[in-house]
Image: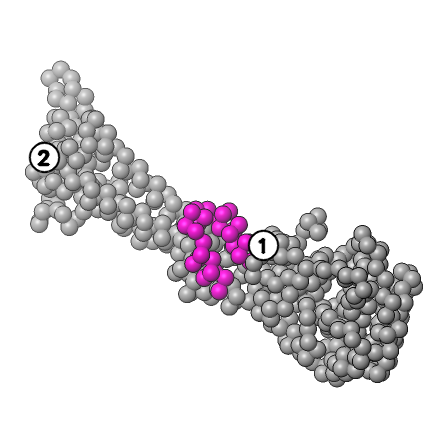
Amino acid sequence: MKILTFTGRTPSEALKKAKMEIGDEGMLIETKEIQKKALGREALYEIVIGIDESMLPVGYGKTAKPLKTKHSLKEESKDILFDISNAAKQISEISKVTQPVDNLYGETSAANGFTESKELKEIKSEINKLTDKVKIIQNMFWDEKSPDLENQIPSEFAEIYRLASQSGMNQEHLHELMQVTLEHMPLKMRENSTTVKRYFQTILRKMVPIRRENPVSVGNKKVIMLVGPTGVGKTTSIAKLAARYSYLLEKKYKVGLVVLDTYRIGAVEQLMQYARMMKLGIETVVDPPEFSTALESLKYCDYILIDTMGSSPYDKGKIEKIYECLNANQTHYSVDVVLVMPSSIKYDDLKITYDNFATLGVDTLMFTKLDETRGFGNIFSLAYETKKPISYFSVGQEVPEDLVCANSDFLIECLLNGFNRSKV
Ligand SMILES: Nc1nc2c(ncn2[C@@H]2O[C@H](COP(=O)(O)OP(=O)(O)OP(=O)(O)O)[C@@H](O)[C@H]2O)c(=O)[nH]1
Ligand SMILES: [Mg+2]
């Protein structure tokens, strides 16, 4: 856009000059009285007109004086992409420019014979271009590695996109989630990032499989075996569960413990101590055939909790031994296998661990050490990928209190806002 000035003894004289020189296509931006009328001296007015260069008569350029202090808006917008604050300033400058037009002498520029709609359209399109550029810059900050999404995700989604991708969630799941959210979110909810976050939270909650704790009914029995890598918190979790069922719930259940020590490494001692403290029966299994005997001898219990020694996911031998025990089960009790994993390892490692223990017929997942991690997207992704429900979370070393029955609200709250002990 070219900015031109014209002078006259009255504003309409200046306007007439402008029309004669550049036609009707200009936009009246400003009118100034540059000299007051005095004795023997005419008043002098200056009007400022903006016009698209393509609308200027051919060869025009000698009579009207370009306004040097103002830059062409097109020129300024060229470099704006790399400077958000400048872009924001530019947007407000453009919107200011349009204001005096309608108020000049109490009449609109259209009434002055100028076609304002075309110019307004141009300004609007300038504003839109700049706004888009600001959005592109925001997108670039979200994730440089997601060019596909960059073009699709509106800026109100920036916060949840950042939170979810920083949470350690698997990239494919993240993209899938974004697609689902974009497709299904009602337009009304897109208005701001708070409603977007609330909607996203609801979708996440619906996507994570959870096994709610269902206390054992009269005459029935639950046999739960904890398996998993070394040092993840299996024995500590067995102690927490034993305490929960035997004296923390409203109904007090009879609890018995079994420990598999098939490698004869003395894994029994730690659990023995808990059993003594809580006065619980405990059985040790060294050879697979002893498994059934151990279960039978605890048949008076409502809950039988089985601790296993930790095995590296790559140690097929140890996992095989556990499998042999499960296979040697001659009783009519079915064993619920819970795979215990720390929340502090990344999704790919959780997946490898899961795949290696899957031969045992994993029923539910338990995640420990939630107090030691920041991202929870890895947990979400594993449950989502394997479709195995989460049964428990362990949130610290303290027995029995640092145990949380799985619920999706808690996990998604951790994922989007971080772990907060006060919300346990
Ligand atoms: N911070 C934190 N520490 C935990 C949690 N659960 C267990 N621990 C600690 O992790 C360590 C190992 O716990 P164990 O219960 O012995 O782990 P394990 O899986 O039985 O280990 P192995 O039998 O050797 O395979 C102990 O120091 C526990 O106190 C938890 O949720 N948070
Ligand atoms: Mg142990």
Q: Which residues are magenta?
A: 176-204
Is residue 231 visible in the rendered image? The answer is no
Chain-order first, disc 2 or disc 1: 2
Residue at position x 80%, y 71% from top? 306
92 in relation to 142, above or below: above
Task: Judge left or right: residue 17 versus residue 253.
Answer: left
Task: Judge left or right: residue 325 versus residue 85.
Answer: right
Q: Is residue 203 magenta?
A: yes
Task: Judge left or right: residue 20 versus residue 334.
Answer: left
Residue at position x 12%, y 20% from top? 41
Q: Is residue 50 magenta?
A: no
Residue 156, horizontal then vertical, whole percent: 45, 51
Indicate the colouring scheme.
one colour
Quarter-of-image position of residue 262: bottom right
Residue at position x 61%, y 63% from top? 209
Q: How many marks?
A: 2
Residue at position x 55%, y 67% from top? 170
What residue is pinned by disc 2?
Answer: 17
Q: Return the residue nearer the eye: 329 or 48.
A: 329
191 in relation to 141, above or below: above
170 in relation to 418, above or below: below
Quarter-of-image position of residue 65: top left
